Amino acid sequence: MAATLSSPKHDIAIIGAGPGGSSAAYFLTKQGYNVLLLDKAEFPRHKTCGDGLTPRALDILSEMGLLEDVHREGFRIDGIHLFAPRQQHLHMPIPQKENLPNYLVTIPRFKLDQLIFERAIQAGAIFKGKTNIHNIEKTARGILISGKHNQQNIEIEARMGIIATGANLKLLKNTRIIKRQPTMIMAARQYLDGVSGLSRNVAAYFDGIPLPGYGWVFPISDTMANIGVGYWPHGIARHWKPKNANQVFNDFIAQETVREMLKNAIALEPVKGFPIRMDFPTAATFGQGCLLVGEAAGLVNPLTGEGIDFALESGRLAAEHIQGMFRRGDFSSDDFVAYNALLRRHFQRLFVMLARIRKLYINPLLISRFIESAQNIPDLQLMLANIILGHEDAAAGVAPKTIRQVLLGK
Amino acid sequence: MASYSEAMQMLELTSRTFYLPIVKLPAGLRDAVAAGYLCLRAIDEIEDHATLDGQVKAVLLHGISRILQAQTSVERFAHAEFAQLFSEYRDELPEVTLRIGEWACYAPTFIAPRVWEATATMSDRMAQWAVDNWRVDNQSDLDRYTYGVAGAVGLLLCDIWAWFEKVQIHRTHAIQFGRGLQTVNILRNRVDDLARGVDYFPDGWSFEQMFTYARENLDGFSSYAKTLPLTTFMHFVEIPRSLAYATLEALERGEEKLSRQAVLNIVGAFEQG
């Protein structure tokens, strides 16, 4: 490494300026840390996603002072429609949960990510775009980051790092933080305008789609929608043998109910496919003097594919943990292990439960039963809503009694 | 415990010379140095207090030292003992002194005991100087005074840098730096000190001898510092070092102190650098 005796110029270097990286940057700069935010793109930039913000995500955005902006730029959603394979249909309002908002907001990631990013920059984070990071090494005084900025080789020193590179595995593999290819969800989405029948509700379809998986219609205005599909390329879905996510998408919009909505619609762009990680329960969460946040740590809801909330929450957790590390001042490996424990305490139970629900219920046999039962059992409906929204104590609902209720179609 | 913004606010309030160099340090290093500065400033305010008498100063300074020596960790820090010690003098002591426990705990826990040690030791020495009415008879007394209240700060900084930056700074030269800065302060405050009956000049010493003493120490440090690669340490000492030299030159020209404009120029050059 460069033979200077100078201290790392930055306290924390953050690789990836999406919601996870930018929220961590915001919370750290607010506490007086010198933060360098790196991204392969310049902002604003597009990001393929379902564009939905859960009450938990809105809560953190509110803490960041972004709620008004999100309301202005986004589209408020008050309920959820679920459509089961055998025509069963369920409508649920967004339940009130403690002090969280009782609504969702859809907002294109092009806008949302820019808002969060700008907030980090306003707070004092330094940004370097068009920067591809190839490697990170731990050194005696921190980390040495190497990569390319505008085709030029660069080296950056920092006391420590945060990796927030989303589903892109290149850096995590180069640094040997992850060694195996994690299982990924396949997804595809498209923005369409002139969609008929949109309301202040999001819709999830378990019909005409490989299970486990679902198709979605998320309105982003009175006439525009983010329409997409996500499915797990294992389990029963495997037997569908879809060639790719675009094909699954085309099958989804060809089914009658969706086709009807789209008869006057125009696509605003081609269909975009994207993989999603959701392997948090077994994923690495640190390495090479860096903490991992968001999707880079596999933190995407393994039932719904929602990742923005977990990116924001883990960004804030990482920021708080780093503050503690600087407060203690020993930067030992114990501190990194403790971060892993912190994430496990926060998310492990929820993720394991959500994955279990996916395996148990999101199949042609039970999903219809489940939705049908929920029409008549308010508790089950509430539980279902809580599960979909990723609320932590949703697990309480999956009691053997409930399963019996569903199986017997009470 | 004080928050980052509280500590930096107090720092800005209490030091024109060190505020900028400290806030520009990397986090962690910054917090240790800020904590050290504020703790030492807290006891300095007692030593220099205009109305408290020497015996009271000694009681307070020894008291601070005893409290610090008895601490076992940041988590179990006995904040209440400071409140008790200061209770009779709350109205006379400045905020930076009253909150010394908060500054002591603002240091990262890994290095905090080193900050406490420096503060406790200096506090005891200051108490002795207060009881002796700062009597300086010969050069040995001057060496002892400039070491006790400033040279030792150099040693503290060496240890903080070794902890955070994994670099070793020469202890002898770090002490010279402290002694040099303190002597410049003595020269600048000469009139005020004499007015309150304190004379830091060894018997028979002229201004020229004091100037020489200051320069020898500052130069000893500076010529060593030139051999260091550009480090956070060099960056950190740049403002106080430049201000010290500029003050010496102003005093030698017969000015009372360095002009405000000259201070702003030096600080401004650093800010842009």
Image (tube, grey):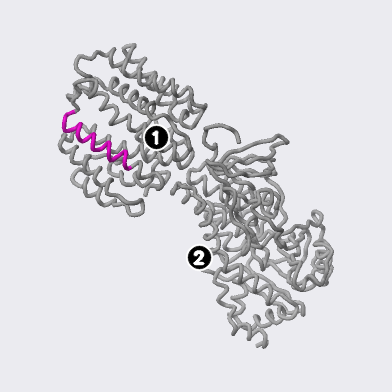
In this picture, residue B119 sits left or right of residue A263? left
Quick check: is A114 in the magenta stretch? Answer: no
Q: Could you classify mark 1 by the number of other residues whose Cα lies within 10 Å: few (under 14), some (14-19), or many (20 or more)?
A: many
* In the depicted structure, whether residue B255 falls above or below residue B120: above
Q: Position of residue A186 (x, y in %)?
A: 75, 62
Q: Which residues are magenta?
A: B116-133
Which tag is nearer the camera, tag 1 or tag 2?
1
Quick check: is B123 in the magenta stretch? Answer: yes
Quarter of the rendering containing residue B33:
top left
The chain that hosts pointer 1 is: B
In this picture, residue A66 sits left or right of residue A203? left
* In the depicted structure, whether residue A189 falls above or below residue A158: below
Callout 1 touching callout 2 (CB < 8 Å): no
The chain that hosts pointer 2 is: A
Between A293 and B136, the one lying in front of the other is: B136
Query: What residue is shown at x 48% (from left), y 23% (from top)?
Result: B227
Q: Position of residue A98 (x, y in %)?
A: 50, 68
Residue that mark 1 sits on: B157
Which disc number belongs to residue A99? Answer: 2
Between A38 and A44, the one lying in front of the other is: A38
Both labels 1 and 2 in a single chain? no
In this picture, residue B201 sits left or right of residue B102? left
